[in-house]
Amino acid sequence: MITIERLKELGVDTKEGLARCMNNEKFYLKMIRIGIEDKHFEMLEQAIADKDIQAAFDSAHALKGVIGNLAITPIYAPLNRLTEMLRAKMNANYEPIYKPIKEAREKILREL
């Protein structure tokens, strides 16, 4: 089961995330689970594989809000970059940009 201490070790800004959840640790940890299990991660990965820029942007943008509010920094930082590249419809190979997002998410998922 994930703890605040373990989230800190994984690079999550738990102080900010807790503040956004009224310093309610139980609620914050529940929201972490909901956020990290969000279906948009799979949708984003599939859209990137399909080279569907609009669908990828839609999923990335949705995740950016959730992950940002929970202060999951190891996912938020690369996700923010990815979202802005998709918004600009940059011609790029998005799979390597998504990789650190996926890896950081998997680390947290293993702790749930």
Image (cartoon, rainbow, N blue to C red):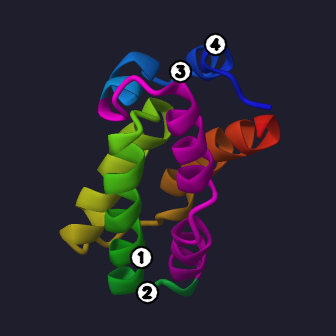
Front residue of this view, candidates 71 and 75: 71
Contact (CB < 8 A) between labels 1 and 4?
A: no
Instruction: Tell me, yes or no, whether the highlighted magenta stretch contains residue 77.
Output: no
For discs 4 and 2, the disc positioned in front in the rendered view: 4
Helix, strand or loop status at disc 3: loop
Of mark 1 and mark 4, the one earlier in the sequence is 4
Residue at mark 3 = 11
Cα separation between marks 4 and 2: 38 Å
Disc assigned to residue 5: 4
Of mark 4 and mark 3, the one earlier in the sequence is 4
Disc assigned to residue 52: 2
Q: Residues within 10 Å of mark 2 (few under 14, many from 20)?
A: few
Residue 52 image position (x, y, % from top left): 43, 87
Residue 29 versus residue 51 in the image, above or below: above
Cα separation between marks 3 and 1: 25 Å
Q: Amino acid at mark 2?
A: Asp
Q: Amino acid at mark 1?
A: Ala
Residue at mark 1 = 56
* Residue at 39% from the left image edge and 33% from the top image edge: 71
Cα separation between marks 4 and 3: 10 Å
Residue 103 image position (x, y, % from top left): 67, 43
Of mark 3 and mark 2, the one earlier in the sequence is 3
Q: Amino acid at mark 4?
A: Glu
Q: Residues within 10 Å of mark 1 (few under 14, many from 20)?
A: many
* Residue at 80% from the left image edge and 32% from the top image edge: 1
Helix, strand or loop status at disc 4: helix
Cα separation between marks 1 and 2: 6 Å
Q: What kind of secondary structure does the magenta stretch mostly adopt?
A: helix
Of mark 4 and mark 2, the one earlier in the sequence is 4
Residue 33 versus residue 21 in the image, above or below: below
Contact (CB < 8 A) between labels 1 and 2?
A: yes
Range of magenta residues: 20-49
